[in-house]
Amino acid sequence: MFDIGFSELVLVGVIALLVIGPEKLPHTVRMVAAYTGRIKRAINDLKYELEKEVEVQEIKQRLQNEINSSGLTQLKQNLETDIQCAQNSALATKAPPTKTEAPSVPATDPRPDTHL
Protein backbone atom coordinates (compact mmCIF):
# COMPACT_ATOMS: atom_id res chain seq x y z
CA MET A 1 0.00 0.00 0.00
CA PHE A 2 2.50 2.58 1.15
CA ASP A 3 6.16 2.09 0.31
CA ILE A 4 7.53 2.84 3.74
CA GLY A 5 10.93 1.40 4.46
CA PHE A 6 12.68 0.77 7.77
CA SER A 7 14.66 4.01 7.64
CA GLU A 8 11.46 6.02 7.13
CA LEU A 9 9.81 4.29 10.10
CA VAL A 10 12.81 5.12 12.27
CA LEU A 11 12.64 8.74 11.15
CA VAL A 12 8.91 8.95 12.01
CA GLY A 13 9.65 7.33 15.40
CA VAL A 14 12.41 9.82 16.22
CA ILE A 15 10.19 12.78 15.25
CA ALA A 16 7.31 11.37 17.33
CA LEU A 17 9.68 10.89 20.30
CA LEU A 18 10.82 14.48 20.06
CA VAL A 19 7.33 15.98 19.56
CA ILE A 20 5.30 13.82 21.97
CA GLY A 21 7.94 12.98 24.49
CA PRO A 22 9.07 9.65 26.00
CA GLU A 23 6.34 9.59 28.69
CA LYS A 24 3.34 9.86 26.36
CA LEU A 25 4.76 7.98 23.35
CA PRO A 26 3.71 4.41 24.41
CA HIS A 27 0.15 5.55 25.11
CA THR A 28 -0.02 7.45 21.80
CA VAL A 29 1.29 4.45 19.84
CA ARG A 30 -1.35 2.19 21.48
CA MET A 31 -4.11 4.66 20.66
CA VAL A 32 -2.97 5.02 17.05
CA ALA A 33 -2.82 1.23 16.70
CA ALA A 34 -6.31 0.85 18.22
CA TYR A 35 -7.81 3.46 15.89
CA THR A 36 -6.02 1.94 12.92
CA GLY A 37 -7.48 -1.46 13.80
CA ARG A 38 -10.98 0.00 14.12
CA ILE A 39 -10.66 1.74 10.78
CA LYS A 40 -9.44 -1.44 9.09
CA ARG A 41 -12.34 -3.46 10.54
CA ALA A 42 -14.84 -0.83 9.44
CA ILE A 43 -13.40 -0.79 5.93
CA ASN A 44 -13.43 -4.60 5.74
CA ASP A 45 -17.05 -4.73 6.97
CA LEU A 46 -18.09 -2.12 4.43
CA LYS A 47 -16.25 -3.98 1.69
CA TYR A 48 -17.97 -7.25 2.66
CA GLU A 49 -21.42 -5.62 2.66
CA LEU A 50 -20.82 -4.00 -0.72
CA GLU A 51 -19.65 -7.30 -2.21
CA LYS A 52 -22.76 -9.05 -0.89
CA GLU A 53 -25.00 -6.30 -2.28
CA VAL A 54 -23.34 -6.47 -5.68
CA GLU A 55 -23.68 -10.26 -5.63
CA VAL A 56 -27.39 -10.01 -4.80
CA GLN A 57 -27.89 -7.46 -7.59
CA GLU A 58 -26.10 -9.75 -10.07
CA ILE A 59 -28.28 -12.70 -9.04
CA LYS A 60 -31.44 -10.61 -9.42
CA GLN A 61 -30.29 -9.44 -12.85
CA ARG A 62 -29.51 -13.00 -13.98
CA LEU A 63 -32.88 -14.21 -12.71
CA GLN A 64 -34.69 -11.42 -14.54
CA ASN A 65 -32.77 -12.23 -17.73
CA GLU A 66 -33.70 -15.91 -17.41
CA ILE A 67 -37.36 -15.05 -16.85
CA ASN A 68 -37.38 -12.75 -19.86
CA SER A 69 -35.60 -15.23 -22.12
CA SER A 70 -37.77 -18.18 -21.08
CA GLY A 71 -41.04 -16.41 -21.87
CA LEU A 72 -42.39 -16.62 -18.33
CA THR A 73 -43.17 -12.91 -18.37
CA GLN A 74 -45.39 -13.34 -21.42
CA LEU A 75 -47.03 -16.38 -19.81
CA LYS A 76 -47.73 -14.39 -16.65
CA GLN A 77 -49.26 -11.53 -18.66
CA ASN A 78 -51.42 -13.99 -20.62
CA LEU A 79 -52.65 -15.61 -17.42
CA GLU A 80 -53.47 -12.25 -15.87
CA THR A 81 -55.39 -11.25 -19.00
CA ASP A 82 -57.30 -14.55 -19.02
CA ILE A 83 -58.18 -14.16 -15.33
CA GLN A 84 -59.37 -10.61 -15.90
CA CYS A 85 -61.50 -11.68 -18.88
CA ALA A 86 -62.99 -14.56 -16.89
CA GLN A 87 -63.86 -12.25 -14.03
CA ASN A 88 -65.44 -9.73 -16.40
CA SER A 89 -67.50 -12.39 -18.18
CA ALA A 90 -68.63 -13.87 -14.86
CA LEU A 91 -69.83 -10.46 -13.77
CA ALA A 92 -71.55 -9.83 -17.12
CA THR A 93 -73.43 -13.16 -17.16
CA LYS A 94 -74.54 -12.88 -13.59
CA ALA A 95 -78.29 -12.03 -13.61
CA PRO A 96 -79.30 -8.92 -11.76
CA PRO A 97 -81.04 -9.68 -8.50
CA THR A 98 -84.82 -10.02 -8.85
CA LYS A 99 -87.29 -8.58 -6.43
CA THR A 100 -89.16 -11.10 -4.36
CA GLU A 101 -92.83 -10.59 -4.85
CA ALA A 102 -95.15 -10.32 -1.89
CA PRO A 103 -97.68 -13.13 -1.59
CA SER A 104 -100.86 -12.26 -3.45
CA VAL A 105 -103.97 -11.52 -1.40
CA PRO A 106 -107.04 -13.50 -2.50
CA ALA A 107 -109.87 -11.45 -3.94
CA THR A 108 -112.40 -12.84 -1.50
CA ASP A 109 -112.24 -12.00 2.12
CA PRO A 110 -111.61 -15.19 4.12
CA ARG A 111 -113.25 -13.76 7.22
CA PRO A 112 -116.74 -14.96 7.93
CA ASP A 113 -119.56 -12.50 7.61
CA THR A 114 -120.22 -10.94 10.95
CA HIS A 115 -123.24 -8.81 10.07
CA LEU A 116 -126.56 -10.51 9.81
Image (cartoon, rainbow, N blue to C red):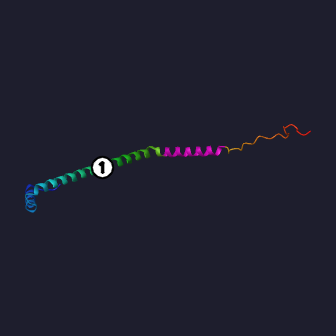
Where residue 65 sits in the image (x, y, percent)?
A: 40, 47
Element at badge 1?
Answer: helix
Stretch in magenta: 74-94
Position of the N terminus, as image quadrant, is: bottom left
Q: Residue at x 39, y 45 (%)?
A: 63
Where residue 81 sits in the image (x, y, percent)?
A: 54, 46
Between residues 53 and 18, which one lies in front from this camera angle? 18
Between residues 19 and 1, which one lies in front from this camera angle? 19
Between residues 32 and 1, which one lies in front from this camera angle? 32
Residue where numbered disc 1 is placed: 49
In this rendering, is residue 18 above or below 71? below
Position of the C terminus, as image quadrant, is: top right
Q: Residue furthest right?
A: 116
In this rendering, is residue 109 above or below 4? above
Figure label count: 1
Between residues 10 and 110, which one lies in front from this camera angle? 110
Where residue 113 sits in the image (x, y, percent)?
A: 88, 38
Q: Is residue 76 magenta?
A: yes
Tag 1: amino acid: Glu
Horizontal side of 64 relative to 9 (left or right) equals right
Horizontal side of 39 relative to 63 (left or right) equals left
Where residue 90 sits in the image (x, y, percent)?
A: 62, 43
Q: Residue at x 14, y 53 (%)?
A: 30
Q: Residue furthest bottom?
A: 19
Disc 1 residue crowd, few under 14, some 14–19, many 20+, Cα 10 Å: few
Q: Residue at x 58, y 45 (%)?
A: 85
Main structural element of the magenta stretch: helix, strand or loop? helix
